[in-house]
Amino acid sequence: MIPNNNIKVKLSPELRLEQALQKMDFEIKHFNYADVKLTIAGTLIEDDIRFIRDAMSWSLSELDLCEACFEDGKIADYAFSNCTCLSSITFPYHSDLEIGAYSFFKTALTSIFIPDTVVKIHEDAFRDCEYLESITVHPDHDIYESNNGVLFNKNCTKLLFYPQGRQGNYEIPDSVIEVGNLAFPHCHGLTSVTIPASVVDAGGEYPFVECQNLTSITVHPDNPKYTSIDGVLFNKEITSMIVLPYSKKGDFYISASLIGHEFLSYMNEDCPGLTSITVHPDNPEYSSENGVLFTKDKRRLMVCPTGWQGAYDIPDTTVEIGNLAFLGCAGLTSITIPNSVVEIGRNAFSDCVGLTSVFIPCSVVEIGSDAFSGFWSIKKFEDCPAFITVHPDNPVYKSENGKLTRTLYRRIISPHFISLECCEK
């Protein structure tokens, strides 16, 4: 038995990592709980990496590869993924190296030093490293550079990766022209971002994805491509919303020029602090009433803000409740659907866990799939036997013991967790 867990191994074509550890009498069973510090010299091949990932993922805390190299000069995709105790890595100093996609996915790395031997880093190499606070690059590196712990290309014109474990506000440097695709992945500690006038690409299709504590984005007024209003990121013309920060609270303002439907997806469950929506009266497509978003003619209810609290009476101008309209409105306690409503869209009331009952009027003739799914607050259906009731004159639907069925064939369509029961007409 090795007297401590500081292990040094030199590999050769005849001696692979697993065999080397066996030769040193280091028992595999200790890998389940030991705090292992492993130093490797020689060439690592796929079998060695697989052994580390499969046998040491819960025990390896430090990996020193200063005197090592990799077969084909690359740390393979997913090589050390889910090595959840790995908090320190030293890369090879004597051979060129590429770091593949998700190589260190879900590891416990807190800081990384990139030597000048690293010639390529995949954009997803350090994805979901939730404790990673800083990346430092060798000052003589020809390709990469670091600034205040953030990874950039040389000369800092492109921001490549913002460490997920960093906390607080961040001001993008004035030298930056482009933000890499998914450069801010799941940065839960990020609270606000300032974008300078120089940035003309803010991060592809999904910038700041799932940054759950992001409250605001501020853009320099001289930026030619972007602008911000009340912490929300838009294109310069304000015809397209780019990012609605997840933790934005209060009201969301829709200008006269904001059209299209792409921005609506941000409001469904992604912003739990959003309590109202206000639309400029000159907007050609949308209108709002009492903080809820409608089409211009108010015939279709589009979105109720996720942070809505209490009861809501749908206006009698409404003909259709749109898909996902009340998705995730956990604070919604009751809903009144008027006789004007003909259609209830797909997932319209999904995850409205505060609702205890719904009445379907006789006017409703179409209800989309999973319209009332996910009422997990009702632990047993028997606790709320009259959850869904239907007007007796409804020509299409009826309720039986709180379950919504069609009258033409007995198919239970809601709540979502009740099994389907079909039979003859």
Image (spheres, rainbow, N blue to C red):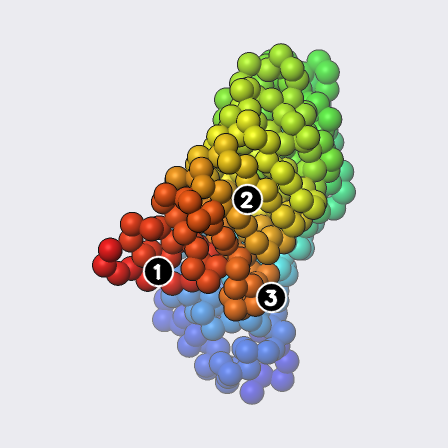
Whole-number angstrom distance, CA of label 3 to CA of label 2 = 37 Å
Position in image of residue 5 (x %, y %):
62, 77
The residue drawn where x is 53% and y is 60% is 386
Q: Which residue is mark 3?
A: 85
Label drawn at residue 327 = 2
User: Is 288 or 62 nearer to us in this picture?
Assistant: 288
Residue furthest toward the right?
Answer: 168
Query: What amino acid is labelled 2 in the image?
Result: Leu
Residue furthest toward the bottom?
Answer: 1
User: Would you place residue 290 above or below residue 236 in this image?
Assistant: below
Which badge, 3 or 2, comes first in the chain's sequence?
Answer: 3
Residue furthest toward the front?
Answer: 393
Q: Which residue is mark 1?
A: 420
Position in image of residue 279 (x %, y %):
65, 22
Name the quadrant containing residue 277.
Answer: top right
The residue drawn where x is 66% and y is 17% is 280
Position in image of residue 50 (x %, y %):
42, 65
The residue drawn where x is 53% and y is 20% is 297
Whole-number angstrom distance, CA of label 1 to CA of label 3 = 45 Å
Which badge, 2 or 1, comes first in the chain's sequence?
Answer: 2
